[in-house]
Image (cartoon, rainbow, N blue to C red):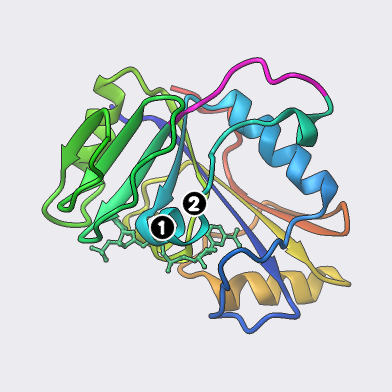
Amino acid sequence: MRPFVHLNFAIDVATEPSAFPAGVEVSCAADWRRVHQLREDYDAIAVGARTWNLDRPRLTARPERLGREPSRQPVRVIFSGSQVCMPAQPGTPVFAVGQAALDNADTVLTAPTHGLDHPLAALAGHGIRSMLVEGGPTLLRSFLQQGLFDYLTLYIRADDACSAERAARASLSPLPAFRAVRPFGAGFLVEAGMPPGTVMQ
Ligand SMILES: NC(=O)c1ccc[n+]([C@@H]2O[C@H](COP(=O)([O-])OP(=O)(O)OC[C@H]3O[C@@H](n4cnc5c(N)ncnc54)[C@H](OP(=O)(O)O)[C@@H]3O)[C@@H](O)[C@H]2O)c1
């Protein structure tokens, strides 16, 4: 058993495919609203240690993005790997997965390698039935390479669908076949895998 895993990422075609500078906003207002709605829907949000340390993300669903009060907040999951992580700000419970410390984590799931099977089973054992993975690229590639995800959405700032698809494939691999590429907000939304509701465990 593992949680339903949804991978989400944002790419700007104007940026070098391998460059994901910290603190740069790629999403448009419509995409931020979509992401904050997802944060409400999922039991947990996950990020990698470098995103956690560089961006200091709050990992909350927020009224200013939703235009209303959020109905609930997800727990936070930090894939720390070998990195020492900055302490968490007050908020929902924090799970740390890896070898290194996150001093005030509520639950530490020790993982000597990047194998995801055991940590995901352990998260399910803690009642996490669904998890939104918000990056960065190293963590996303880990899920992609191990095939341990159900649904993938990429918001791409691009002028046309072909450049959106090209940028997606240049930025992250191995990507599965896309089920849809559609205009969304100031760019495109690329989808792969099975949306929640079709395979929710
Ligand atoms: N555009 C977007 O949508 C978006 C979203 C989020 C972040 N970002 C940007 O992405 C950049 C950071 O990305 P990044 O790729 O450098 O780092 P990252 O993915 O945020 O974090 C990498 C860390 O995750 C750990 N890790 C990866 N896979 C793991 C696994 N399976 N189990 C346990 N730990 C695992 C690694 O451990 P090891 O130390 O053991 O290797 C490493 O410490 C930042 O600039 C951030 O702003 C962009």
Magenta stretch, main secondary structure, is loop
For the point 83% across and 48% down, the residue is 29
Front residue of this view, candidates 142 and 51:
51
Rendering coords of residue 108 (x, y %): 19, 36
Per the image, label 2 sits on a secondary structure element best described as loop
Q: Regarding mark 1 in the picture, which secondary structure is present there? A: helix
Instruction: Confirm or deny contact between disc 1 and disc 2 (CB under 8 A).
Output: yes
Residue 56, numbered circle: 2
**What is the spatial separation of the Cα atoms under label 1 and label 2, in whole angstroms?**
6 Å
Left or right: residue 81 versus residue 53 is left
The residue identified by callout 1 is 53
Location of residue 73 by image quarter = top right
Q: Amino acid at mark 1?
A: Asn
Q: Which mark is residue 90?
A: none
Total tally of numbered discs in the picture: 2
Q: Residue at x 84, y 28 (%)?
A: 67
Query: Closest to the observer: 112 or 60?
Result: 60
Q: Quadrant of residue 142?
A: bottom left
Q: Quadrant of the N terminus?
A: top left
Pinpoint residue 46: horizontal percent, then vertical percent.
43, 42
Q: For label 1, count other residues whose C-alpha is less than 10 Å away and answer few (under 14), some (14-19) or many (20+).
A: some
Magenta-colored span: 68-75
Would residue 72 be counted in the magenta stretch?
yes
Q: Residue at x 72, y 62 (%)?
A: 26
Above or below, 122 relative to 187: above
Q: Amino acid at mark 2?
A: Arg
Quick check: is the Cβ at mark 1 less than 8 Å away from ligand 1?
no
Dividing the image into four quarters, tell me where ligand 1 lies.
bottom left
- 98 relative to 193 in the view: left or right: left
Most foreground residue, 26 or 17: 26
Where 182 sits versus 11, above or below? above
Q: Residues within 10 Å of mark 2 (few under 14, many from 20)?
A: some
